[in-house]
Amino acid sequence: MNEATLKEARILMVDDDVNSTCLMTNFLHRIGYGQLRSINDSTHTFEAIEAFAPDLILLDLAMPNISGFQVLEALRADRQGENQIPVLVLTGDDSAKNKRRALAAGATDLLVKPFDTSEVSMRIRNLLQAHFLRLEIQEQNRVLEDRVRERTRELEGALENLRATQRQLLQQERLSAFGEMAGGVVHDFSNSLMSIIGYSEMLITNAKARADEATALEYLRIINTAGRDGAHVVSRLRDFYRPRGAADLLEPLDLNEIVTQSIALAKPRGAKREREKTVSFRTDFKGEVMAAGIGAELREVLTNLIFNALDAIPGAGIITLRTFTQRGSAIVEVTDTGAGMSAEVRERCLEPFFTTKGDQGTGLGLAMVFGIIKRHQGALEIESEPGKGATFRIQLPACAQGVATPSGNVLAIVPRAEAA
Ligand SMILES: Nc1ncnc2c1ncn2[C@@H]1O[C@H](COP(=O)(O)OP(=O)(O)O)[C@@H](O)[C@H]1O
Ligand SMILES: [Mg+2]
């Protein structure tokens, strides 16, 4: 703190004794203080404080009307905490009780008359220095608080922007997931249509098949299953934002039956090749294999795998569907003797839109397969090498038995320990 600033300080003297204030004024002038004011009637103290805004008050205690103690108490009540003006009490009464009372009432410091001038000058200097330092700190705090407020506002703005971006991203992700799923639905739905069209065409064009009631009924059953599966596929669109609900309860399914149905559903596409005896289907069932699942979805999985196998077999080949139970899991394998996959294709084949078939492929079949297996809490393993065919192994929670619910549904019971 420089000397000039200190000597700019405003000092207010309150003392009923005119002599005292004159002496003090002269003294203060002499040691360099220029801004001085004195009042001898203590009733005007607060007006003077208001008008003069002192940095220091020199206060007498024994005064008529309003005593120095009353001034101190009023000052303290008026300015709580902040903006306290230091008060140096000048008193003729040097009793300990008097001093204590003054300090308790809020005096910053106290001097007993008669004074030693150099002591007065030092005390005034100390009080002013402390006062100015405090003001400076207060000012700095204010600046800091403003800065913090401003930064907080900026951060809040940035946070809001971030949230908006996140919302947008989520929306975009949902849209693209929805697009993918819609693509998958179209893909699987056209698989169902293909079965319906294929078998109905056989009935239309083949009078012998029509005449044989058993064959006709079999074809109609397949058409019926394909139609129902198609409806299930479409319901996935509606269910997009809805988690699996009560209507999707897993049923106990005979996997051998699902495999047989899937081969029948996929056959129209393989029919021509089978007729030319280039591709044959084989099944390998090791006893009854029961899994917990949704029939329509598992048929979708298997027909997709069969179509891929057909695509992978350029000339003659075999497609084998095998089922068995292993350590509490129901397993279905689809193996073909086709072209197989390179390591890169094997790694990427589950990605939506990944296809090596150019315009002929959609790249959605395996993505749907994977999604369905995941929703069944199952697992998918792929074994394949170029030139050595491929095996897709699906592992599903096996189910011990089914129970009927009050609504007439049948729930699959998955043994807990084994399902893990
Ligand atoms: N059984 C298989 N043998 C060889 N490659 C396969 C087989 N199944 C799938 N793939 C590879 O995985 C890719 C992705 O399959 P998929 O998701 O069904 O899409 P798409 O059949 O429309 O190409 C195929 O393009 C193919 O390269
Ligand atoms: Mg495919």
Image: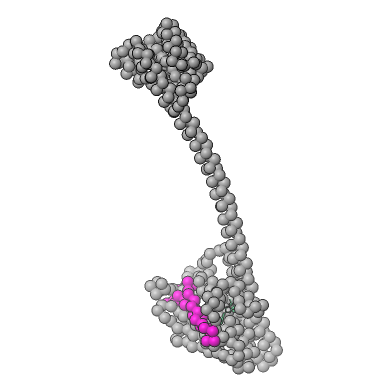
Position of residue 29 measured from the top left corner of the image (x, y, whole percent): 46, 13
Q: Quadrant of the C terminus?
A: bottom left
Residue 114 higher or lower than 413, as above or below: above
Magenta region = 376-404
Q: Residue at x 51, y 74 (%)?
A: 373
Position of residue 272 measured from the top left corner of the image (x, y, whole percent): 64, 89
| Residue 114, quarter of the rendered image | top left
Residue lying furthest left in this view?
96
Q: Residue at x 38, y 21 (%)?
A: 108
Relative placement, left or right, of 325 versus 161 is left
Q: Residue at x 48, y 22 (%)?
A: 4
Position of residue 21 measured from the top left corner of the image (x, y, whole percent): 43, 9
Q: Nearer the viewer, residue 404 or 355?
A: 355
Residue 327 higher or lower than 170, as above or below: below
Colour mode?
A: one colour
Main secondary structure type of the part rendered in magenta: strand
| Residue 23, quarter of the rendered image | top left
Position of residue 19 measured from the top left corner of the image (x, y, whole percent): 42, 6
Q: Quick check: is 66 in the magenta stretch?
A: no
User: Which quadrant of the frame does ligand 1 lie within?
Assistant: bottom right
User: In this rendering, does residue 45 appear at all?
Assistant: no
User: In this rendering, does residue 34 appear at all?
Assistant: yes
Q: Residue at x 63, y 79 (%)?
A: 357
